Image: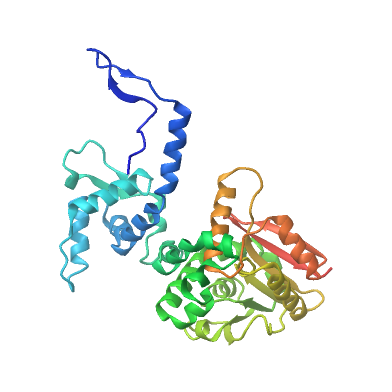
């Protein structure tokens, strides 16, 4: 494969002068560079995954900055039960690559790669696992899991056949698959649990006054119960009900103030002062969303609330819009018909479900909290 040009200038020496001669179109070269960056972007999550599995963010956070040799010795020490011979050259190349994207700091000016030192950054600290309940590492391991990566091979088929990529790859839905595969189920649940911690801490704080009037709260599709755990810790008067499928509830830990309940959200949602759905609606097509919202409407009293936590696809061109659209393509893989939506698209769903009004509270993340009311 021919490499992309390093810049818009060919490295051709002029006659006897050693000067560079500009012989290419700058905009065309820039386009080619951007294209190669996109084509090879799969390297990024896989390099991050390797670093997390080797526990590098934790090693550097605890003892860094460290040289490549020092990091290698810590990796070897943590793998005494298996025969490992840490390849320092490969380790250096992974660290160097991640440092180029700001995942680690890199000491400049060291001629021997083994002695180059790497330190923590704000990004690498998000991947620290030990003692970090808000670690992004479990979500990374889900995003880079080979089970889901295989489904991406069928994105084109979804256009030609109208099929779901995951179903095409495995002959069953993602929900059926995780129900039959304990390791994938564990990976998924751990990712959802840790990923929700930071978001729900913000929800508990920013909707503090609203929670004061809620005595019972059902979390629909609440997984391991981590979201409810965050809320009841901050608002101990609330009795939480965590509703999810049997194979999920089977692995949910006991949580003070939370009752784990097996059931299908499409069939029944228990009555409560308020119903919460976090990252549920984006899993489903519009008709299923309306059905869930109507079930939630019926489960709450006249003055009850339905709380929805979802990402909002921004208008215009911005990093938040690109991230929202990345999640949208991800939903094509992880769900059967799910998608990310704009505020206007959510508004139509709420109206169809019978709600009279809503209030939107932007969170310090891609997500927003929607507070739905019957009046």
| Left or right of 163 in this view: 170 | left
| Left or right of 198 in this view: 287 | right
Residue, x 59% and y 76% (percent of image)? 221
> How many numbered discs sit on the rendered protein?
0
| Left or right of 112 in this view: 15 | right
Residue, x 39% and y 49% (percent of image)? 40
Residue at the extreme front: 160
Image coordinates of residue 130 in percent, x first then y, are 35, 66
Along the viewing direction, whichever of 240 and 284 lies nearer the viewer: 284
Height in image: 142 above or below 319? Answer: below
Image coordinates of residue 258 in percent, x first then y, are 57, 82
Residue at the extreme top: 16
Residue, x 29% and y 22% (percent of image)? 12
| Left or right of 256 in this view: 21 | left
Along the viewing direction, whichever of 119 and 234 lies nearer the viewer: 119
Image coordinates of residue 287 in percent, x first then y, are 71, 71
Image quarter hosting the N terminus:
top left
Q: Quadrant of residue 231?
A: bottom right
Residue, x 31% and y 64% (percent of image)? 53
Height in image: 261 above or below 308? Answer: below
Image quarter hosting the C terminus:
bottom right
């Amino acid at each position: 494969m021919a490499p992309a040009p390093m810049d818009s200038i060919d490295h051709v020496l002029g006659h006897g002068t050693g000067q560079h001669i500009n012989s290419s179109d700058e905009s065309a070269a820039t386009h080619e560079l951007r294209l190669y960056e996109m084509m090879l972007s799969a390297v990024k999550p896989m390099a991050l995954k390797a670093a997390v599995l080797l526990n590098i963010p934790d090693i550097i956070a605890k003892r860094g900055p460290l040289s490549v040799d020092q990091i290698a010795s810590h990796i070897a020490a943590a793998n005494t039960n298996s025969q490992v011979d840490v390849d320092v050259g490969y380790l250096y190349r992974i660290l160097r690559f991640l440092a180029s994207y700001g995942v680690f700091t890199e000491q400049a000016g060291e001629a021997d790669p083994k002695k180059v030192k790497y330190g923590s950054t704000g990004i690498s600290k998000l991947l620290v696992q030990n003692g970090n309940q808000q670690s992004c590492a479990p979500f990374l391991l889900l995003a880079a899991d080979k089970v889901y990566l295989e489904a991406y091979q069928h994105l084109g088929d979804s256009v030609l056949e109208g099929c779901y990529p995951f179903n095409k790859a495995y002959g069953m839905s993602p929900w059926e698959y995780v129900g039959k595969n304990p390791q994938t189920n564990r990976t998924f649940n751990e990712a959802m649990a840790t990923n929700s911690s930071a978001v729900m801490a913000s929800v508990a704080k920013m909707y503090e006054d609203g929670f004061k009037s809620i005595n019972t709260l059902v979390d629909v599709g609440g997984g391991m119960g981590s979201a409810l755990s965050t809320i009841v810790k901050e608002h101990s008067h609330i009795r939480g009900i965590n509703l999810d499928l049997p194979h999920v509830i089977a692995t949910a830990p006991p949580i003070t103030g939370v009752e784990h309940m097996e059931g299908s959200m499409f069939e029944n949602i228990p009555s409560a002062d308020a119903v919460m759905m976090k990252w549920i609606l984006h899993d489903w097509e519009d008709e299923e969303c309306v059905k869930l919202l109507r079930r939630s409407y019926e489960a709450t009293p006249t003055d009850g609330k339905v709380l929805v936590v979802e990402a909002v696809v921004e208008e215009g061109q911005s990093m938040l819009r690109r991230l929202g659209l990345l999640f949208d393509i991800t939903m094509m893989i992880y769900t059967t018909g799910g998608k990310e939506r704009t505020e206007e698209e959510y508004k139509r769903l709420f109206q169809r479900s019978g709600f009279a009004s809503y209030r939107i509270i932007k969170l310090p993340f891609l997500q927003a909290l929607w507070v739905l009311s019957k009046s």
